[in-house]
Image (cartoon, rainbow, N blue to C red):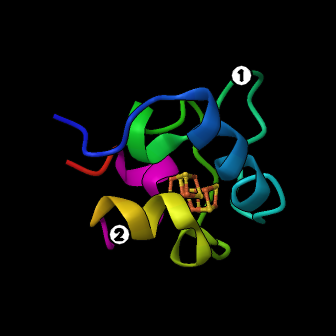
């Protein structure tokens, strides 16, 4: 089960970090990959902002590139 809750609050925080990320896939409606799972069309790795995100630090997750690898479980 995913450790991160799929909430509006987490989505808003996520978009501050995933939004400007060079790896962000920019698919309509997609974000919060640590909770929802990977993108339908992931990009190549060009950096990941998850390490700076408070959703990540509050969750106990320590991963990166959830848009490519899938949710934190
Ligand atoms: S999960 Fe990481 S790599 Fe993917 S868009 Fe968000 S910050 Fe960027
Ligand atoms: S850890 Fe990454 S995918 Fe999860 S909310 Fe933060 S920026 Fe978004």
Any mark on residue 63, and which? 2
Region in magenta: 61-70
**Is 60 left or right of 1, judged from the image as shown?**
right
Residue 26 visible within the image = yes
**Is 44 left or right of 64, judged from the image as shown?**
right
Residue 2 vs 49, above or below: the answer is above
Q: Which residue lies under the disc numbered 1?
A: 29
Rendered-image quadrant of the N terminus: top left
Whether 13 is among the magenta residues is: no
Question: Which quadrant of the figure has residue 4?
Answer: top left
Ligand 2 image position (quadrant): bottom right
Whether 68 is among the magenta residues is: yes
Residue 15 vs 21, above or below: the answer is above
Q: What residue lies at 71% left-to-right and 52% top-to-bottom?
A: 24
Local crowd size for mark 1, using a 10 Å CA cut-off: few (<14), some (14–19), many (≥20) = few
Q: What residue lies at 49% left-to-right and 42% top-to-bottom?
A: 33
Q: Residue furthest top?
A: 29
């Amino acid at each position: 089960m995913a450790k991160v809750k799929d909430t509006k609050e987490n989505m808003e925080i996520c978009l501050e970090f995933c939004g400007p990320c060079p790896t962000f896939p920019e698919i309509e409606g997609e974000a919060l990959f640590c909770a929802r799972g990977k993108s339908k069309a992931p990009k190549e790795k060009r950096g990941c902002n998850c390490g700076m995100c408070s959703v990540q630090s509050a969750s106990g997750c320590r991963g990166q590139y959830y848009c490519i690898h899938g949710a934190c479980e």
